[in-house]
Image (tube, rainbow, N blue to C red):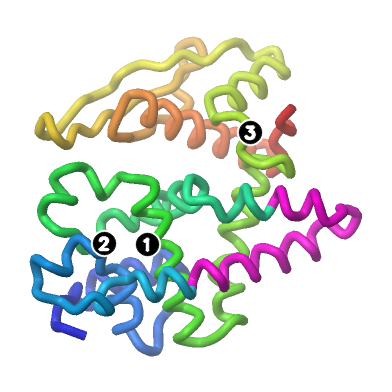
Amino acid sequence: MANVQLDDCALERLEAGLGYRFKDRSLLAQALVHRSLVNEADLADTDCNERLEFLGDAALGLVAAELLYRRYPDRAEGGLTHARASLVNLETLGEIGGALGLGEFVQLGRGEDLSGGRERRSMLGRALEAVLGAVYLDQGLDALREVLNPLLIRELDLYGWEGPAKDFKSRLQEHLQANAEGTPEYELVSMEGPDHHLLFTMSVRLGRAVLASGEGSSKQRAEQAAARAALTAILDGEGTTDVPAAD
């Protein structure tokens, strides 16, 4: 592969977020090379992360299916298939990739970067698939399970068995109202950056109390991020990971 790499300090920070240390860091470096960089950096098509993405997608499907099979022994094939689809779609993977901070590490072409590619769910989801493919090549399926299962379990705990049928704002409101705590309200905290790459920060309040804040490339995405953070904090405080099931 051409010499287009992140430095070791950056890769170490990403490894810390993953909870995994690569034996061969060149796999992780390649997993972070987006196709948009190929022409700008004079790379070969096979130097970008798409081959690792292809492998990671397949390995992800297997690990997700195994996890669901063991976690829900009373569920029939149709239910397992639905739950797997909710876990491995790019929207969910993009959320996980965003939470891991992958956008900071992915190497993009200038145009893709300026157009907000670092926050694009589809890009983050595909980058996560590539990273998972790199983990699989580095140390095999057991290592991939160790990295991936906690991430998938967290998504199941947040969304419930039915998958992301409702957004986090709806789920937070339902949870608060079910406990007679009132209705959450959202407030713009800040709006920073150039016009083509704005970053919004929104807070969510319950009465005078600020529950959490979140960031996103639009007010709507920042509100969703704030609602997710608030819901996670509330459930952690209650000592449970159960979220009201989607209708």
* CB contact under 8 Å: marks 1 and 2: yes
Q: In this picture, is 20 found above or below 163? A: below
User: Is 155 part of what is drawn in magenta?
Assistant: no
Say which residue appears at 61% left-offset and 11% top-offset.
182
Answer yes or no: is residue 24 visible. yes
> Looking at the image, which residue is at 55% across and 30% down?
167
Mark 1: few/some/many CA within 10 Å (<14, 14-19, 20+):
many
| Residue 141 drawn above or below residue 200 | below
Residue range highlighted in magenta:
56-83
In the rendered structure, does residue 72 fall within the stretch colored magenta? yes
Neighbourhood count class around disc 2 (C-alpha, 10 Å): few under 14, some 14–19, many 20 upward? many
Q: Which mark is residue 106?
A: 2
Q: Residue 86 got which mark?
A: none
First in sequence, mark 1 or 3: give its number: 1
Q: Name the residue under label 1.
A: 127
Specify the quadrant of the image occupied by residue 105. bottom left
Q: In this view, does 63 lie to the left or right of 212?
A: right
Q: Earlier in the sequence, mark 1 or mark 2?
A: 2
Does residue 3 lie above or below 165 as drawn? below
Instruction: Kindly identify the residue that appears in the image at 46 percent across and 47 percent down.
Output: 95
Instruction: Check disc 3 and report the residue beneath it.
Output: 165
Residue 87 screen position, x and y as percent: 60, 52
Sequence-wise, the earlier of marks 2 and 3 is: 2
Residue 239 seen from this side? no
Report the side of 247 relative to 108 (left or right): right
**Picture coordinates of residue 150, whole percent (x, y):** 60, 61
